[in-house]
Amino acid sequence: MTRANVTATGLAAARAGPRSRMLHRGLGALGEGRTVTHRYAEVLMSAQEIDAYLEGLDEPRRSTLQQLRETILEIVPDAEQCISYGLPAFRVHGRVVAGFAAFKNHLSYLPHSGSVLPELGDDFAGYGGTRGSLHFPIDRPLPKPLVEKLIATRLRQISER
């Protein structure tokens, strides 16, 4: 892996342009004089992008999704935070296993597979959604046992492929 020196000027320029350009140049968010690998810079920037996504939300959406984020990271601590399809997501071994989004009247948990929710059918009594998203109230986070089941199912599906 190549290394790049990160400067405050480079960081400002990178923030102004597309994320891919920033990563291509090897710029990260560690500040003047620090050295990072491209991959590490990508992970840091993705976490910052999720921070920015959450900062753009009003309460209680922000705190509810922040709690979901923390729950996901407790369940899969080695997950990389990323942006997938423009929304916060979590990647394990290069595959997206979970994500979330805020909407006007609900929040969504996104398993990034159309077969996770149908497989767990009865576990979602009281929740709405679609084949690829579980909808829940803006002021009530998903219970940790439910998130554990969702992630375990997605990880199992990935491993079976």
Image: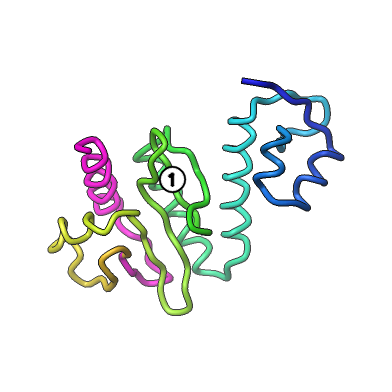
Residue at 78% in and 31% down: 6
Q: Position of residue 95 (x, y in %)?
A: 38, 41
Q: Is residue 151 above or below residue 65?
A: above
Residue in the picture at 66% in, 47% down: 19
Q: Magenta stretch?
A: 134-161
Image quadrant occupied by the N terminus: top right
How was this image coloured?
A: rainbow
Give the tally of numbered discs: 1
Looking at the image, residue 67 sits to the left or right of residue 9; the answer is left
Label 1's element? strand
The disc labelled 1 sits on which kind of residue?
A: Phe
Q: Position of residue 32 (x, y in %)?
A: 83, 30
Which of 78 and 58 lies nearest the eye of the viewer?
A: 78
Q: Is residue 1 above or below residue 75?
A: above
| Type of secondary structure dominating the magenta stretch | helix
Residue 153 belongs to magenta span = yes
- Residue 30 position by quadrant: top right
Image spot of residue 63 (x, y percent): 50, 61
> Observer-nearest residue: 117 or 51?
117
Q: Quadrant of residue 31?
A: top right
Vertical comparison of 102 with 157: above or below? below
Asked whether residue 97 is drawn in magenta, I would say: no
Badge 1: few (under 14), some or many (20 or more) residues near its Cα, within 10 Å? many
Q: Which quadrant would residue 40 be assigned to in this image?
A: top right
Residue behind mark 1 = 90
Q: Is residue 130 above or below residue 16?
A: below
Residue at the left extreme? 122
Q: Quadrant of the C terminus?
A: top left
Residue at 46% x, 59% y is 65
